[in-house]
Image: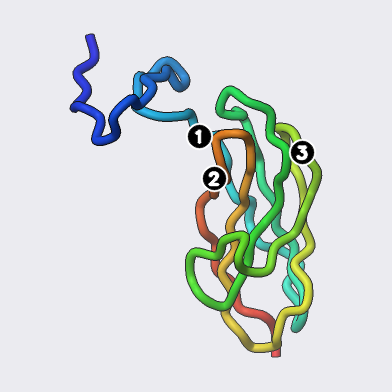
């Protein structure tokens, strides 16, 4: 048995995500890979998508900005589609600046983000 609170949205769909009941669509399982090869104007990161949320991943990459919680409104890379591991090169960075990056995945349920990583570019 699983006890769920009532949905706050009329007509919400109850779904099973990896065997766990929840209200609304399933999110992809996505992690942000470590930041590496940091220079004064670029760095490498990427992501790993192990579960697509029940619908195909149509776009994936890494969002990055000098403020926390970057989204697709920030700078971002586009690194193909589907599940699996991918590598991204973050470019156009300023020297001696702290940046925040997180992987993203988009499917018909929306855009979802991985964990956030921070790093500082070289002088």
- The secondary structure type at the circle numbered 1 is loop
Give above or below for 101 relative to 56: below
Residues 60 and 108: in front is 108
Q: Earlier in the sequence, mark 1 or mark 3?
A: 1
Crowdedness of circle 2 by 10 Å Cα count: few (<14), some, many (20+)? some
Q: Earlier in the sequence, mark 3 or mark 2?
A: 3
Residue at point 72%, 43% (across, down): 59
The residue that disc 1 covers is 27
Q: Between marks 1 and 2, how big is the CA–CA gap?
A: 7 Å
C-beta proximity under 8 Å, tags 1 and 3: no
C-beta proximity under 8 Å, tags 1 and 2: yes
Residue at point 35%, 26% (across, down): 12
On residue 81, which mark appears?
3
Give above or below for 55 relative to 34: above
Q: Is residue 97 left or right of residue 84?
A: left
- Where residue 11 appears, x then y in whole percent? 33, 25
Q: Between marks 3 and 2, how big is the CA–CA gap?
A: 14 Å
- The secondary structure type at the circle numbered 3 is loop
The residue that disc 2 covers is 112
Q: Earlier in the sequence, mark 1 or mark 2?
A: 1
Crowdedness of circle 1 by 10 Å Cα count: few (<14), some, many (20+)? many
Q: Is residue 37 left or right of residue 23?
A: right
């Amino acid at each position: 048995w699983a006890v769920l609170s009532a949905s706050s949205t009329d007509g919400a769909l109850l779904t099973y995500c990896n065997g766990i009941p929840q209200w609304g669509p399933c999110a992809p399982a996505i992690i942000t890979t470590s930041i590496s090869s940091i220079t004064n104007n670029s760095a490498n990161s990427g992501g790993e998508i192990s579960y697509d949320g029940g619908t195909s991943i149509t776009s994936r990459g890494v969002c990055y900005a000098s403020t926390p919680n970057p989204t697709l409104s920030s700078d971002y890379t586009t690194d193909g589609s589907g599940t699996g591991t991918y590598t991204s090169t973050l470019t156009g960075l300023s020297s001696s600046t702290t940046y925040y990056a997180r992987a993203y995945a988009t499917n018909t349920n929306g855009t979802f983000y991985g964990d956030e990583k921070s790093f500082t570019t070289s002088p």
